[in-house]
Image (cartoon, rainbow, N blue to C red):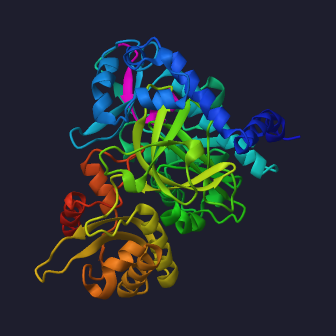
Amino acid sequence: MNETSLLNNIFRLRAKKIDKFATDAEAIQHKVLMNLVQTASDTEWGHKHNYSTIRGYEDFAANVAVQDYESLKGYIDRMRHGESDVLWRGACRWFAKSSGTTNDKSKFIPVTADGLKTVHYSGGRDSVSLYLRLNPASRIFSGKALILGGSHAPNYNLPNSLVGDLSAILIENIMPLVNMVRVPSKKIALLSDFEEKMDRIARTTCKNNVTNISGVPSWMMAVLKHMLDITGKKSVDEIWPNLEVFFHGGVAFTPYREQYHQLVKNPNMHYMETYNASEGFFGIQNDFSDPSMLLMIDYGVFYEFIPFEELDSPSPKAVPLWDVEVGRNYAMLISTSCGLWRYMLGDTVRFTSKDPYKFVITGRTKHFINAFGEELIVDNAEQGLAKACAATGAQVADYTAAPVYMDADARCRHQWLIEFSKQPDSIEKFAEVLDSSLQQINSDYEAKRYKDITLQALEVVVARENLFNDWLKSKGKLGGQHKVPRLSNSRDYINEMLVMNEKQ
């Protein structure tokens, strides 16, 4: 019996509990909500919103308005200065730093001790549980796990209080037992300079027997390619012959899939998507043949959803999980054991099943193009790019897109800035297939493209190698969980990148 078989018995019990998601979802979520409310009833937030009187979802929705970062920012800043019992019981020592808002460069998301245990680490445990169910012959524990992390820094110089990437917070607080099977060392994992960290990870971990890797696809790919460069090997299998699974999240995997197939030749290599963010851990892929993820409903997270088309209305109405509809696009709200209450996460999802609740991420509430009524979302973009790549033999490394509202000839279009890891046979054909695919996928885009009356054919600009990494580096966002904005109604991002693209 191998190491994984021995541990599999422990994880099998958890997998059986997850099976109840298909039959008891409403009861499970109601229990989560009441636990959250009761635990926070003696906090400042709980007193203000009469948590002691809440008996169910209707009371909760009536007492608490929908929140965003701006509405919670004052409370969070007080928590960062050491105040206790503000949004959640006790004091919070850890704050995950993530992409900013209109008014701030960064957001600081509280990560409480309860949240670490009931949300973030639960997600890691269940990723392994579901993987072992899918691959009972696994030898995952016979070797090491490569886990990529960011970095952290002191928080207002308060003792034992830090801010940083969520991944760095998780590594800093990880169980000692897990550290025995994880690489690289904590010292290397938490380096702030990504390029130095990438080099040291590649040079040290290539000597280990790595069986599983975890991280953001773009940054993991940078590490793996660098490791191939310094070792002179042609594939990752030559370095880690026992590598069997990549737990990935943070960005859509579609643009990277073919590149990973070239890096890892083993036909038995597995890829499992996870939905983990600074605010929580929400979903795990539980079927290799189905790209949708299982919503993890018994953590310290209560879910609500606002129909995407109602986001701009004066009073958008949220619905609990048990009232969602399959096939509809929703913005997600969360209430968590980290003190976020009816918090607008910023992501949009579409449910593919309700027994159990499974979903795909479709984009961001602010990362879409709707300059001319076309309502193009990231999910559309990913599908269109996949079809264009298949038709032209191309591989996309990174991309962003924005509208051209009116050029010198009074023409309006979408402009795509794309960095290819493998150039298409023809840029013109790639653009043509992408454009036609988007019309097939999105009826609003198709209507606006009708006879070129509102929108003309899209334009593809080829980005130089490493343009997007250079842009992130210029923003101080190289590595960690930082990512390139895919779609935007504004040209702020793309204009900066186009200037950098000309300085080759």
Query: x and y percent of residue 390 in the render?
Result: 52, 79
Which range is magenta? Answer: 159-174
Q: Is residue 167 magenta?
A: yes
At 37% across and 45% down in the image, what residue appears?
A: 316
At 38% across and 44% down in the image, what residue appears?
A: 194
At 49% across and 40% down in the image, what residue appears?
A: 304
At 43% across and 56% down in the image, what residue appears?
A: 363
Depth check: give the residue in front, 110 or 450.
450
Q: Residue furthest left?
A: 408
Q: Quadrant of residue 29?
A: top right
Depth check: give the residue in front, 298 or 162.
298
**So how many labels did they put on this image?**
0
Query: Horizontal placement of 30 versus 143: left or right?
Result: left
Q: Is residue 168 magenta?
A: yes
Query: x and y percent of residue 217 in the render?
Result: 50, 54
Can the viewer see residue 434? yes
Can the viewer see residue 143? no
